[in-house]
Image (cartoon, coloured by chain):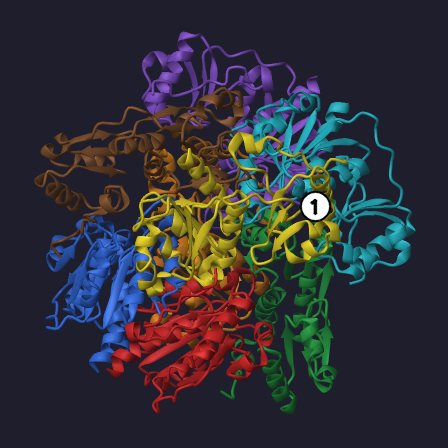
Chain colours: A blue, B yellow, C brown, D cyan, E purple, F green, G red, H orange
Amino acid sequence: MSNVYTPDLNRGDRIGLEEAIFCEGKSSKDLLTILSDYHENNTSCLLTRLSVSKFESLPKQIKEAMDFDPFSKTGFFGQVRQTKKDKLVAIVTAGTSDIGVAREAARTLQHAGEDSIEYDDLGVAGLWRILEKEKELQRYPVVIVVAGMDGALFGVVGGLVASPVIAVPTSVGYGAANHGHTALSVALANCAPGLLVTNIDNGYGAACAALRILRQIRG
Amino acid sequence: MSNVYTPDLNRGDRIGLEEAIFCEGKSSKDLLTILSDYHENNTSCLLTRLSVSKFESLPKQIKEAMDFDPFSKTGFFGQVRQTKKDKLVAIVTAGTSDIGVAREAARTLQHAGEDSIEYDDLGVAGLWRILEKEKELQRYPVVIVVAGMDGALFGVVGGLVASPVIAVPTSVGYGAANHGHTALSVALANCAPGLLVTNIDNGYGAACAALRILRQIRG
Amino acid sequence: MSNVYTPDLNRGDRIGLEEAIFCEGKSSKDLLTILSDYHENNTSCLLTRLSVSKFESLPKQIKEAMDFDPFSKTGFFGQVRQTKKDKLVAIVTAGTSDIGVAREAARTLQHAGEDSIEYDDLGVAGLWRILEKEKELQRYPVVIVVAGMDGALFGVVGGLVASPVIAVPTSVGYGAANHGHTALSVALANCAPGLLVTNIDNGYGAACAALRILRQIRG
Amino acid sequence: MSNVYTPDLNRGDRIGLEEAIFCEGKSSKDLLTILSDYHENNTSCLLTRLSVSKFESLPKQIKEAMDFDPFSKTGFFGQVRQTKKDKLVAIVTAGTSDIGVAREAARTLQHAGEDSIEYDDLGVAGLWRILEKEKELQRYPVVIVVAGMDGALFGVVGGLVASPVIAVPTSVGYGAANHGHTALSVALANCAPGLLVTNIDNGYGAACAALRILRQIRG
Amino acid sequence: MSNVYTPDLNRGDRIGLEEAIFCEGKSSKDLLTILSDYHENNTSCLLTRLSVSKFESLPKQIKEAMDFDPFSKTGFFGQVRQTKKDKLVAIVTAGTSDIGVAREAARTLQHAGEDSIEYDDLGVAGLWRILEKEKELQRYPVVIVVAGMDGALFGVVGGLVASPVIAVPTSVGYGAANHGHTALSVALANCAPGLLVTNIDNGYGAACAALRILRQIRG
Amino acid sequence: MSNVYTPDLNRGDRIGLEEAIFCEGKSSKDLLTILSDYHENNTSCLLTRLSVSKFESLPKQIKEAMDFDPFSKTGFFGQVRQTKKDKLVAIVTAGTSDIGVAREAARTLQHAGEDSIEYDDLGVAGLWRILEKEKELQRYPVVIVVAGMDGALFGVVGGLVASPVIAVPTSVGYGAANHGHTALSVALANCAPGLLVTNIDNGYGAACAALRILRQIRG
Amino acid sequence: MSNVYTPDLNRGDRIGLEEAIFCEGKSSKDLLTILSDYHENNTSCLLTRLSVSKFESLPKQIKEAMDFDPFSKTGFFGQVRQTKKDKLVAIVTAGTSDIGVAREAARTLQHAGEDSIEYDDLGVAGLWRILEKEKELQRYPVVIVVAGMDGALFGVVGGLVASPVIAVPTSVGYGAANHGHTALSVALANCAPGLLVTNIDNGYGAACAALRILRQIRG
Amino acid sequence: MSNVYTPDLNRGDRIGLEEAIFCEGKSSKDLLTILSDYHENNTSCLLTRLSVSKFESLPKQIKEAMDFDPFSKTGFFGQVRQTKKDKLVAIVTAGTSDIGVAREAARTLQHAGEDSIEYDDLGVAGLWRILEKEKELQRYPVVIVVAGMDGALFGVVGGLVASPVIAVPTSVGYGAANHGHTALSVALANCAPGLLVTNIDNGYGAACAALRILRQIRG
């Protein structure tokens, strides 16, 4: 019972994405075991869904080796690579409450060496806000849209830009928002053709999908 | 067991809306009993959710006394009143598949003496379509929006006009559209403030709500 | 990443409703950024779903500029306008546990300059309570009904008054009450014709809908 | 594999209710096997959920031995006992579409020797209809209420009479009526104290429950 | 806004059940307002779903006037009547975790003057436990069965006794137990004929239903 | 596009179970392509969920090579092996309507060379029926229980026998039976320890699981 | 009411995807109106979800102008462009029953001038089937995976190839497959990083998403 | 009311599994009553779902008599038997977050005298991890697979080994993982034939099922 994890060693070579550590549900003890091994082997990695309290419970030495962002609950452990100069990904949020999830996407891209630009609080209740950015958005080869509640922004962006659009529904809202399931269903049942969808609050997944696409574009 | 129904006799006086006959689930025999009584008493009424086959099963005399529209599954039984000259209600649909439900609303309004205007197939995947109508729509004291699938049109209209907006989700779509429940949840969990919502496919209910509002406006 | 929000500047002119700040899901830091801007520009606004602990976490200067009501979790930030003399909206609750949501509606109306009257604890288990108020209620051009659990009050009021009736289901109850989804479905699948429905616990939305209607009535 | 059923022979003695044959899902062949045995042994029984087409597929001799009611989909096979003179059960329906289920309850009572009285189409959208019957209903030791859609009638009756009230939700309605699940949840999450609930469309079960109660009352 | 409640004054006369105070969702302030009125008028009442912390928050004088049971979260406020000598209700639980809900039923009966007997932990995984009590249970005119998880006990008891059986599903269990919804559905979709069902964890409702039946039996 | 299927050639060697053909959702054309190949190669196989109409649509030659059972919707195509002499599996059904699913299990076992014995209609509403078989059932190394509606039989059998018990929920029932999902949840959330569960109506899967166990027992 | 549709005229220029006609829910009359206009203007288009019976109901002239494929329910109306020589998209199905949906994707790509290659029936129950194709699949810049039931193939392919992987859940399966919702949830909650998901049975949407990506790759 | 539990005394003899104490939902007081009796009678037992705080609340004497494992929330109370030398059960987890549930299974087996071996973190996103263990896993007569999120490991293992495979879905994941219901549905709707499924997070149940099978194998 000593080996609580089996690292997917060649994932980077195989699919171009390094393994990240999903911290939710892992005991602090198991998490520490993993990070200590990484520390010893001088391996760097991305941590996701790392709560402030779980981060605080780690030993000082480990914490000091980590660039932790409490808002997106992500950590960069060890060395982080330089980001490429050109920004190919735009990240749009419908409301201020969606920014934490958008930041998870931005940080995941950054950890993989891709910079991104964020356009915040452009929900369709004030439609001029997104229309004002139409031309700008059309310049990006990949657009990530982050929205909760009614998720109406997914389809509007999908109808304005020709690039692949990745929809990230968030759990923002109450009652009929159903913890993000309404925004998720909206993204899936959309009239705008060719929307791509990830799990609720899954900024990390949207970034990984963007990285898969960028790899094909950059060649 | 002879009396299968108890007419709500003074409903028109009480709440300004005559009782309509909801035909779904009623046996043809019971429906005939009711209509025969109405015929005898020379009372007129609106029938909703009357399928073609149930209509066809009625006796010739009853059918001839009815103005039946198979597309909206509505019937006008007996005399129909004149509609008022001014149109105060706009009905907008997101797609061609939503028109049957929109027609149920239009016919219900017509039966109560109110005319309406229909704007069809203005879904947000081609956003310019609704934007082109913005000024026109703002002129109507009541706007009914009929949409299935992602229901994104509800919030867009709600953000463009100041009048009361009544959202009618439809069961158009498949998979994550969930028989209209996604469009319904979208309408309810909307960022556009003050949307009013009715049941799925309930054009009749939207029209009744509009009539309640018009009664206050017309004074 | 410095601009965490994009104010919908002309919303008041466009749809007659000023933008409100939905506080749930916003970090205290982002909320403070927004309020500081408002403070600087001498702009007033309504805050909804502001928990006591988030309110308490704000700086003293900001708190003093706010009229905060913990029961409805609403805040008036900055100057508040005078309410009009005539009360056109009645707000009815089914039980004492529904009053928090009703107060959110009343406060939203008040912030927009409309006074209202509240009738509390008139659930149909003691039917005489609502019947006693029938004549009074019929005088109001808009009636908001707030109810959880079985939501039977929606249909009863809908069958007694001719005005537009706005149903606000609440999350009061347990088990089969399903966090308000039963009351919501009841409002939607109602036999009383022309009920208008908002999201669960959405007193704010009901008030906004009422304001849209009042604007048409007041002309 | 020859014995497709195991009759619960002493059920009548044990719990006061004879075994009935639930026909849904049984192959016509298996149903015929069972009825032939009953015919041979001169045993009578009640059949429920017997569709017209399945009834029609039975041999003439079996059909002639059955009093079949297509509306409630019930059959009395063999001899039927005399009903008692006094009627102790009132059955109330909210709408004409609920009568089929009410009839299943009435026929089940009749088969067990209890007569009943039916009050039809007393839904709360026209509240005076049920109020007019208040005194009459209070005379019955058991009241069965049959309602679909919003199911508001359950709580209203539960608040008016002191007898045990058995709620039978029906699958009447569409959209948010959710095939009877909304009416079911309404009955369960009710503010009227002490409502008793059965499965959707289960007139048979409501009658059986009434028979259990009547057995205690008649002593 | 001073009157936060409207007491259902003649409920006892009308339906034989005094109004109880459902404490969940009520603010401590509103609860105190109600109890102070009762105290002043020397009225006694039953409180349900009163959490320990809400009870503790009440003033000493009010607490001393209450017989509070933390396990069932019920309180008797003011004078309590004598219970009748004969016990007509048996309460059976499937497991030790269901006892809190059973106690709510027992306390509600006691407050209305009816004593009861409890049979605990008789789940069907050890079938001999319920079979051993078969004869005893058959003596009671009303049997309440309280069970969570699979709820198999409902049908077993329903098949063993002729009295009315009231099923109270509980939220005991995890995963597929679905917070009591599985036990609830089991009670409703039961093969044992004539089971009567209440909301999840609703011991109070089961007791009220029993009181309605007892009133008919005692005459 | 000519190869519509990729046979899992060594499945029998690998996991001891030959590949079966799941016919639902396959076009008649694709099904015929597969069977013609099998016919040519003189390979035998089991077909499941083969509707009568799809079977009838096959060419005569193919039909004649098949032992088709319409009740369980299974077909044996080609040669069938001899069944072993000793019966190690008991299949119990709760009601006559569950027999079709039980037969699918029996036929799957038979096709793999294992005989079984069926005990039908032993639901717990008449508890003596299953108790009478207790000793007999305890003799079988594997017991399959097939039940719909409330699924109470799963836990009762699980508490009576020491062998592995495989629960097969069926879609028998209506309303709260939820197309078999209630019986499924009951099997999963059971108090009887160590129940094993398969998909709704999945007699085939239960038989395959039994075959995996028998392989270990027979050694 | 004469204009039942509003063509999104410049969609091709705007987002690189021509408007397609979703035929489900449209009346035959409305569909004919649209196609007649297209015919007159010599415009070509793609039709999706066109059932055989609706196709058959069209006039001969229209039918002859259409390349209709009943298996994928798609039609090419008018002239079809030449497909590009290089195939950049691989389409993998888990089972033969998923091929109809895969064909919808292939036909949509073809209509837009992109060829594709299909790998059929590679579900993970026989894992060697997909492993055998690993190297081949890694060559394609876009991989579409079509799977119902357990949807395990999505994650396996996502872990083997570096290209963007588009998951299309299908409604194949029964019981716990939940009409495709289980496969959908599996795709969304996947451990393989960066999976992109579309609606259930939405081969059309997957193809449109692929076209968005290809546009970026082809530059 | 003094007897809060009814021990299933001969369960071990009857079904080969001693009764365990499910601690969730039991009050500390009731739990103590039970354990004190066991202590007095020198009976040993297994406790499941015993939270750290509930364990800590027990008296010192009771705590000292217990081997408590906080990670799996299990306790061995009193004497524990020797485990058998040969390990017949393999327990596989998909991720580190699933280990707590796996440990519950291992501890339950250990308490019943069966040792087991654990293979951790072998999820299919890095497919080589499980393939590397294929031969080893095939040696065990029973394989338990523990997985959350997409649950893809269930089918992969089911397709690789011939032994009975018991799937334990876990509540690991978020959004579309639906608290383990997605993994549960995946296990049930699986293409790999003959998977056996237990409740979400039910390591205890999986171990009990394994014990039933082992009893047949060991003879």
Give how far across and how far down residue H166 sits, in percent.
Answer: 49, 62
**Quadrant location, the N terminus of chain E:** top left
For the point 39% across and 60% down, which residue is it? Answer: H148
Looking at the picture, does residue D74 appear above or below residue D210?
below
Residue nearest the viewer, comparing B176 with A109: B176
For the point 30% across and 32% down, which residue is it? Answer: C109
Give how far across and how far down residue H31 sits, in percent.
Answer: 44, 35
Amino acid carrying label 1: it is: Leu
Looking at the picture, does residue E58 appear above or below residue F194?
above
**Residue H59's image quarter?**
top left
**Horizontally, is B48 left or right of D85 in the view?**
left
Q: Which residue is mark 1?
A: B31
**Residue A22's image quarter?**
bottom left
Q: Is residue C176 visible?
A: yes
Which secondary structure lies at badge 1?
helix
Q: Is residue E88 visible?
A: no
**Horizontally, is B195 left or right of C190 in the view?**
left
